[in-house]
Image: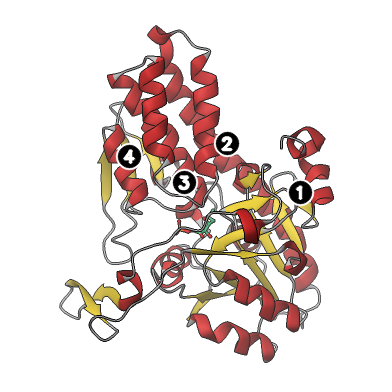
């Protein structure tokens, strides 16, 4: 499997060379609709409302959001005020800040008259880098999968469990957690994926199942609560998830429910891997449980659910009694001690300060 053609990327520049085309992920899997972003506000809205989501894609969308903003005002003031709008869109995925910082630092060194062009070029570079880094994650993860597969009876598939969507559409291509899965498929290795539904927004059921189905990757959807049971019964060989923020000591924030899976995996001796790109590391933080900001989302996502009727109409229905108070933390933190290894574009390391510093260099690790 080659990376998808540029026309199939989860975000691409429109043929007009100005506006940006995204897939509206709030409508999946019921409708595949492309949306055109023409302004900073539209880019910010797309991130905020989760038309685009997933740490890597959020970062690249923000980069293009800055480019769109500079078309209106390329001055330092314009740059700073667009940065301020975009940085507020989602709090947990640090790739947002990473991409915005890279863009702003680069653009400040460019004369105002050439900034728009430079912003588009830099955003395109981030997009292509994301494809390449995810592909590299796929290669490193593939080696892990090969070793685990060697322990399975001949011909039996490797049974992989993933949570949320750290897939092609959470990135620009390949995905992070899904990259080794796609590489395994490409190499003809037998593989089966347990897709956990990921309440309350159901990114597993709506997005990962859609994405794997589209690529003919064998998979089975499970309720979030089923993962521990499957592990207990020897039906899971490896867990692999993505990340929204990784601290310098290897603690990982990812979609709510990830931590419980890590605990169950530890209890049952199942390897638990986290796949992410360097832009997901927050070198300023050590203790993820204490310091990673966790997005608080609308209670309505817990009390209600959206789906499609037999007649093909998208509807939202209430699950809980009217007036029920609900709490909706969007992410949780898995401490490094529960993680078997971190899979990055630079290779695989232990979830520790030393492991990350070995891959990314002391300079990055000392940025604090
Ligand atoms: O709230 P979301 O859908 O943006 O959360 C996405 C996740 O938690 C992913 O697992 C994570 O961003 C990794 S995607 C490369």
Q: CA distance from mark 4 to mark 3?
A: 12 Å
Which quadrant of the structure image shows residue 29? bottom left
User: Residue at the spot x=67%, y=73% of the render?
Assistant: 262
Beta carbon of the mark 4 residue lies under 8 A of ligand 1: no
Residue annotated with mark 3: 57
Considering the numbered disc 3 on the image, is that residue within a helix, a strand or a loop?
A: helix
Looking at the rendered structure, the number of numbered marks drawn on it comes to 4
Q: Are marks 2 and 3 in contact (CB under 8 Å)?
A: no
Q: Is residue 90 left or right of residue 45?
A: right
Residue annotated with mark 4: 43
Q: CA distance from mark 1 to mark 2?
A: 16 Å
Q: Which mark is residue 256?
A: none
Q: Earlier in the sequence, mark 4 or mark 2?
A: 4
User: Residue at the spot x=80%, y=50% of the render?
Assistant: 353
Q: Earlier in the sequence, mark 2 or mark 3?
A: 3
Between disc 2 and disc 3, the foreground one is: 3
Q: CA distance from mark 4 to mark 2?
A: 20 Å
Residue annotated with mark 1: 347
Considering the numbered disc 4 on the image, is that residue within a helix, a strand or a loop?
A: helix
Q: Earlier in the sequence, mark 1 or mark 2?
A: 2
């Amino acid at each position: 499997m080659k990376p998808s053609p540029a026309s199939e990327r989860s975000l691409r520049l429109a043929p007009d060379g100005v506006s940006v085309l995204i897939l509206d992920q709030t409508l999946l899997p019921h409708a595949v609709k492309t949306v055109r972003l023409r302004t900073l506000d539209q880019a910010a809205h797309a991130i905020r409302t989760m038309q685009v989501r997933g740490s890597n894609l959020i970062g690249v969308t923000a980069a293009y959001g800055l480019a769109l903003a500079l078309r209106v005002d390329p001055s330092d003031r314009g740059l700073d005020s667009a940065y301020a709008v975009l940085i507020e869109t989602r709090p947990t995925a640090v790739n947002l800040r990473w991409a915005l910082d890279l863009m702003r630092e680069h653009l400040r060194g460019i004369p105002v008259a050439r900034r728009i062009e430079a912003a588009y070029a830099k955003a395109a570079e981030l997009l292509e880098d994301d494809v390449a880094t995810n592909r590299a994650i796929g290669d490193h993860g593939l080696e892990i999968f090969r070793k685990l597969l060697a322990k399975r009876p001949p011909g039996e598939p490797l049974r992989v469990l993933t949570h949320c969507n750290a897939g092609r559409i959470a990135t620009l291509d390949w995905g992070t957690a899904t990259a080794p899965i796609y590489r395994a498929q490409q190499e003809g290795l037998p593989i089966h994926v347990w897709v956990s539904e990921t309440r309350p927004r159901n990114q597993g059921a709506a997005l990962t199942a859609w994405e794997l189905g589209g690529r003919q990757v064998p998979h089975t959807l499970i309720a979030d609560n089923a993962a521990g049971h499957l592990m207990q019964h020897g039906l899971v060989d490896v867990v692999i998830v993505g990340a929204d923020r990784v601290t310098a000591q290897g603690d990982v924030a990812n979609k709510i429910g990830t931590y419980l899976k890590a605990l169950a995996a530890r209890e049952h001796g199942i390897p638990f891997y986290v796949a992410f790109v360097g832009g997901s590391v927050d070198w300023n933080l050590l203790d993820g449980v204490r310091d990673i900001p966790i997005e608080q989302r609308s209670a309505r996502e817990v009390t209600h659910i959206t789906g499609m009727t037999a007649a093909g109409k998208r509807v939202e229905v209430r699950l809980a009694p009217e007036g029920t108070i609900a709490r909706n933390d969007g992410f949780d933190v898995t401490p490094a001690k529960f993680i078997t290894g971190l899979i990055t574009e630079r290779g695989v390391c232990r979830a520790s300060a030393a492991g990350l510093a070995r891959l990314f260099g002391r300079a990055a690790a000392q940025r604090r």
